Image (cartoon, rainbow, N blue to C red):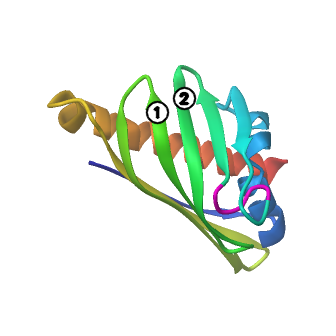
């Protein structure tokens, strides 16, 4: 099982950070994301609960469904489909808190790469290190925008 946790102070106000994180179709403006498309709009807000996004980062593709949307402090998602590696995604949660002249962002993701033995021994650890680095670079991009 992998568990990714990134905690970073982003020197932007909470509304700006939340907008950048919730604008799914705009993710491709960030380093590491090569394509990002909003496939289905949310129930009450375009990027809110129910929204489905398709994100491509190199050879990895995800379909992520928004399951929690509490503007401007929290957003939750689940990865419904991943390629090229099968994945069970149990939780994705982004929490924002105003702090000083910026916003404290805590981003957590938990799941498991579903390839027997190899997933447990190698791929979950790889997902942790790559995922943490990607999340951190994503937040750096928001801060420097």
Above or below residue 19? Residue 115 is above
N-terminal label among 2 and 1: 2
Give the residue at x 72% y 57%.
Answer: 42
- The reply to whether residue 112 is visible in this rendering is yes
The image's mark for residue 59 is: none
Dot 1 crowding, Cα within 10 Å, few <14, some 14–19, many 20+ = some
Instruction: Please provide percent x and percent y for residue 6.
Output: 51, 57
> Where are the magenta residues, as a range?
46-50
Q: Is residue 48 magenta?
A: yes
Above or below residue 33? Residue 44 is below
**Mark 2 and mark 1 residues within 8 Å of each other at the beta carbon:** yes
Above or below residue 39? Residue 101 is below
Instruction: Please provide percent x and percent y for residue 62.
Output: 54, 35
Which residue does the numbered mark 2 point to in the structure image?
A: 61
Quadrant of the rendered image containing residue 49: bottom right
Query: Is residue 139 found left or right of 129 in the rendered image?
Result: right
Instruction: Please provide percent x and percent y for residue 29.
Output: 79, 36
What distance separates the C-alpha of mark 2 from that of mark 1?
6 Å
Which residue does the numbered mark 1 point to in the structure image?
A: 82
Query: Is residue 70 found left or right of 115 in the rendered image?
Result: right
Instruction: Please provide percent x and percent y for residue 80.
Output: 48, 43
Give the residue at x 71% y 28%.
Answer: 35
Give the residue at x 77% y 71%.
Answer: 14
């Amino acid at each position: 099982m992998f568990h990714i946790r990134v905690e970073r102070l982003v020197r932007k106000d909470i509304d700006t950070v939340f907008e950048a994180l919730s604008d799914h179709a705009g993710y491709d403006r960030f380093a590491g994301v090569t394509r990002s498309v909003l496939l289905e709009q949310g129930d009450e807000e375009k990027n809110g609960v129910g929204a489905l996004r398709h994100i491509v980062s190199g050879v990895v593709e995800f379909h992520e469904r928004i399951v929690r949307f509490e503007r401007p402090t929290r957003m939750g998602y689940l990865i419904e489909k991943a390629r090229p590696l099968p994945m069970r995604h149990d939780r994705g949660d982004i929490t924002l808190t105003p702090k000083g002249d910026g916003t404290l962002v805590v981003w957590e993701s938990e799941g498991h790469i579903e390839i027997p033995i190899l997933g447990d021994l190698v791929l979950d650890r790889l997902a942790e290190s790559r995922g943490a680095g990607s999340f951190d670079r994503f937040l750096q991009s928001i801060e420097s925008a």
